[in-house]
Amino acid sequence: MAAAEPRSEPILGVLGIDHVQVAAPAGGEDEARRFYGGLLELPELPKPASLRTRGGVWFACGAHQLHVGIAEPFAPATKAHPALAVGEADLDRLGERLAAAGSPVQWDDAVAGTRRFYTADPWGNRIELVAVG
């Protein structure tokens, strides 16, 4: 099958990404707050009242959101992952902070001109941190 021709206008009105979601096991909200809110410094967002009984926690991530949803049974995403943009001047410092907290930090230079590393959240979900600016 041939690749579709690039379009200059969105198809069906899809404009971009609103949020990404990673999964956590039941009861993981406090650990999510420590990792995403504490180590990564993402501000927590209020979750709509109609969704609070499902568990999980939401964070602001620039103009987008990162949602930590509860999944049972739980299995970490070790390949699929969000890539979070970090200011060029902060990437090394963030890597050091994560390593000091016991999180894995794996630098990757596979893409020329791109500084990035991979880590894992407390449940083993893969997270990419990539320098921008």
Image (spheres, rainbow, N blue to C red):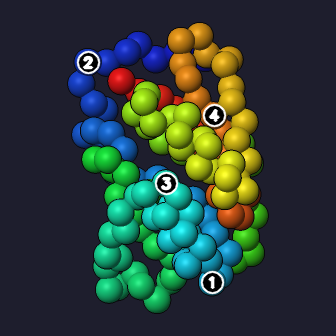
Q: Which mark is residue 117?
A: 4
Return the residue at label 2.
8
Separation (CA) of disc 4 from disc 1: 28 Å
Q: Position of residue 66 (x, y in %)?
A: 44, 57
Separation (CA) of disc 1 from disc 2: 44 Å
Q: Position of residue 19 (x, y in %)?
A: 40, 53
Q: Position of residue 35 (x, y in %)?
A: 56, 63
Residue at (42, 85) in percent of width and height = 52
- Badge 2 marks a residue whose secondary structure is loop
Return the residue at label 3.
40
Separation (CA) of disc 1 from disc 3: 20 Å
Return the residue at label 1.
27
Q: Nearer the viewer's eye, disc 1 or disc 2?
A: 1
Q: Amino acid at mark 4?
A: Phe
Q: Nearer the viewer, residue 12 or 119?
A: 119
Q: Earlier in the sequence, mark 4 or mark 1?
A: 1
Does 73 appear above or below 42?
below
Tell me which corner region of the image, top left, top right, bottom left or bottom right, holds residue 92: top right
Mark 4 and mark 1 residues within 8 Å of each other at the beta carbon? no
Does 96 appear above or below 3?
below
Q: Nearer the viewer's eye, disc 4 or disc 1?
A: 4
Q: Earlier in the sequence, mark 2 or mark 3?
A: 2
- Badge 4 marks a residue whose secondary structure is strand
Q: Nearer the viewer, residue 17 or 90?
A: 90
Q: Amino acid at mark 2?
A: Ser
Q: Earlier in the sequence, mark 2 or mark 4?
A: 2
